[in-house]
Image (cartoon, rainbow, N blue to C red):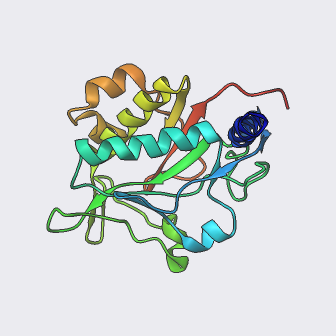
Amino acid sequence: MKYVVFIILFCNTSLLALESTCYGSTSHGRLENGVQLSSQGNNYVSYSKTAELLGRTYVHSKVKEIIEDSYKSLETEMPQKVYKYAETGFKKGGKFSPHKTHRNGLSVDFMVPVVNSSGESIHLPTHLFNKFGYDIEFDKKGHYEGYTIDYEAMAAHIVSLHKKAKVKGAKIWRVIFDPQLQPYLLKTKYGTYLRKHIHFSKKKSWVRHDEHYHVDFIVKCLKY
């Protein structure tokens, strides 16, 4: 009986150890027990193996659950679509150059889903020579060389993130995406939902946010 109690206590302790604690805000904070996003799943990949090794793909444990649950639901809703996440933050949070936020595990960048000239969903190329995708510049309609932003897939992803966040007792604070391209998202079948539930930043950001969209989550944090 003593061994059973010990095993139960050990398992509970292990589970508790996986829970993250965030402090402060996305622009002035830190993180305890950050967890790394999975490198890939059935319909998603990270933007860089090098970045993973450098520890740039850590988030709050609840944010990880939201993101990976969202990708799982999209396997059914958007079975032909593939996704790629980008910069998140360090295991302990804190300053995350060159970003002004991403400091407490609640900020996540996602590369825009794209289709090729044949309309096939593919991953936007992210490598050292294009600053892991951040150096890509789409035109005013969302075209870049042979790639076109898949607004339908992107809108479905944002809606899914919002719904999964709600299930986990969290929220989405804002989504930062080039204001010039936002109308294309609102023209998708998810437009009504996005207008009602998602706050898109209308301010001009210090970087354009056309090749990626930045999502800030709300999870109860302690003072920093």
Frontmost residue, 13 versus 128? 13
Residue drawn at x 41%, y 58% as measured from the top left: 41
Residue at the far left in the pictured view: 118
Residue 33 lies in what quarter of the image? top right
In the picture, which quadrant includes the C terminus? top right
Residue at the far front in the pictured view: 1
Residue drawn at x 36%, y 33% as measured from the top left: 159
Residue at the far top in the pictured view: 196
Frontmost residue, 142 versus 87? 87
Q: Can you give x and y, in whole percent of width and height, for residue 25 in the image?
A: 73, 33
Q: Is residue 215 left or right of residue 159?
A: right
Residue drawn at x 23%, y 35% as measured from the top left: 187
Residue 4 lies in what quarter of the image? top right
Residue drawn at x 32%, y 53% as measured from the top left: 140
Q: Can you give x and y, in whole percent of width and height, for residue 15 in the image?
A: 68, 39
Q: Is residue 208 left or right of residue 221?
A: left
Residue 78 against residue 218 in the figure, above or below: below
Q: Can you give x and y, in whole percent of width and height, for residue 94 in the image?
A: 79, 48
Residue 187 against residue 146 in the figure, above or below: above
Residue 51 against residue 149 in the figure, above or below: below
Q: Is residue 65 visible?
A: yes
Residue at the far bottom in the pictured view: 129
Frontmost residue, 100 versus 80? 80
Q: Can you give x and y, in whole percent of width and height, for residue 170 in the image?
A: 56, 26
Q: Is residue 179 visible?
A: no
Q: Is residue 215 left or right of residue 206?
A: left
Q: Is residue 187 left or right of residue 211?
A: left
